[in-house]
């Protein structure tokens, strides 16, 4: 598999990826709005954008043909708590929509239909040639995903799985451990809980090659709700 040079670790070092997403029911979830926010992010120096759903990936690809897109698709299944690009159907749809790298849940949790993570990674790369970002929650799962062939490992799910529910992102302690033990060619991405430029710089110092920021930049719904809630509590 020939990997896009933009995805290599060296091309990402010290760079920002903006997660341009909006919750279900939000007026911000309109594909044209997502595409406009993605374009603004790229125009102001972001190396790439992280997008949810084939529809949004397609909209950004059309508006920003040269964009570096990390794609995923959140889908909920009754038999599993895995929801970030949980299976082959989702991987294939995200890739077909125009993603350059596909983000998948790389935790050890039971997947919908009992699909095996190792098989999913192997099939994605064999049949599609799709580079993968492992959304991990722990040192063990991050290292395992890299060994299985994922080109990027992210701390995306640290604090969001059953086994890490007592922890809160950012994954300050996890980052240096991953960097020390990941293969040199594997890119380490800090994602989750970064709420300021100072924190993003701290993540780089802790070993991350690149940092993903979402809510603090593009999360209008959550940001406004947080301000309103805090101000109401102070009255």
Image: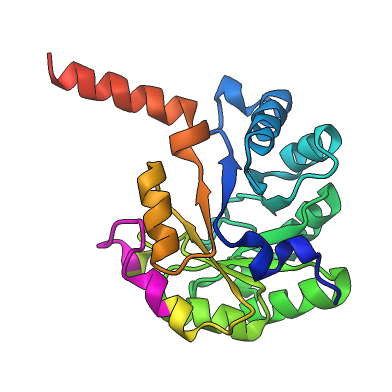
Question: Visible in this render: residue 160?
Answer: no
Query: Where does residue 100 sit, x and y in percent of width and height?
Result: 77, 57
Residue 55 among those drawn in magenta: no
Q: Is residue 36 left or right of residue 213?
A: right
Q: Residue at x 78, y 71 (%)?
A: 124
Q: Is residue 156 above or below residue 136?
A: above
Query: Where does residue 213 sit, x and y in percent of width and height?
Result: 50, 45
- Which segment is the magenta one? 164-177
Quadrant of res 225: top left
Residue closer to the observer: 128 or 193? 193
Residue closer to the observer: 134 or 40? 40
Q: Is residue 159 left or right of residue 62?
A: left
Q: Is residue 76 above or below residue 65?
A: below
Name the residue at the left extreme.
235
Quadrant of res 126: bottom right
Q: Residue at x 65, y 68 (%)?
A: 10
Q: Residue at x 48, y 72 (%)?
A: 109
Query: Where does residue 170 sit, x and y in percent of width and height?
Result: 36, 56
Q: Residue at x 79, y 34 (%)?
A: 59
Question: Visible in this render: residue 17?
Answer: yes
Query: Where does residue 30 sit, x and y in percent of width and height?
Result: 68, 25
In which quadrant will I find the C terminus?
top left
Residue 170 among those drawn in magenta: yes
């Amino acid at each position: 598999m020939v990997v896009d040079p933009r995805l290599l670790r060296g091309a990402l070092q010290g760079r920002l990826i903006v997660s341009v997403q909006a919750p279900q029911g939000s007026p911000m979830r309109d594909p044209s709005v997502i595409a406009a926010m993605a374009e603004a992010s790229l125009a102001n120096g972001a190396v790439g954008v992280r997008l949810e759903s084939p529809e949004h990936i397609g909209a950004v690809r059309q508006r920003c043909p040269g964009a570096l897109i990390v794609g995923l698709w959140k889908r909920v299944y009754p038999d599993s708590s895995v929801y970030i690009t949980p299976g082959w159907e989702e991987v294939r749809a995200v890739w077909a929509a125009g993603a350059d790298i596909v983000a998948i849940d790389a935790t050890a949790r039971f997947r919908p239909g009992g699909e095996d993570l190792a098989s999913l990674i192997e099939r994605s790369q064999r049949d599609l040639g799709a580079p993968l970002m492992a959304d991990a929650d722990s040192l063990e799962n991050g290292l395992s995903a890299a060994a299985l062939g994922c080109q990027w490992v992210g701390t995306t799910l640290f604090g969001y799985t059953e086994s890490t529910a007592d922890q809160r992102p950012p994954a300050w302690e996890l980052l240096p451990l991953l960097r020390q033990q990941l293969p040199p060619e594997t890119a380490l991405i800090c994602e989750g809980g970064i709420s300021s430029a100072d924190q993003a710089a701290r993540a780089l110092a802790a070993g991350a090659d690149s940092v993903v920021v979402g809510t603090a930049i593009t999360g209008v719904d959550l940001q406004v709700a947080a301000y309103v809630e805090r101000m109401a509590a102070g009255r």
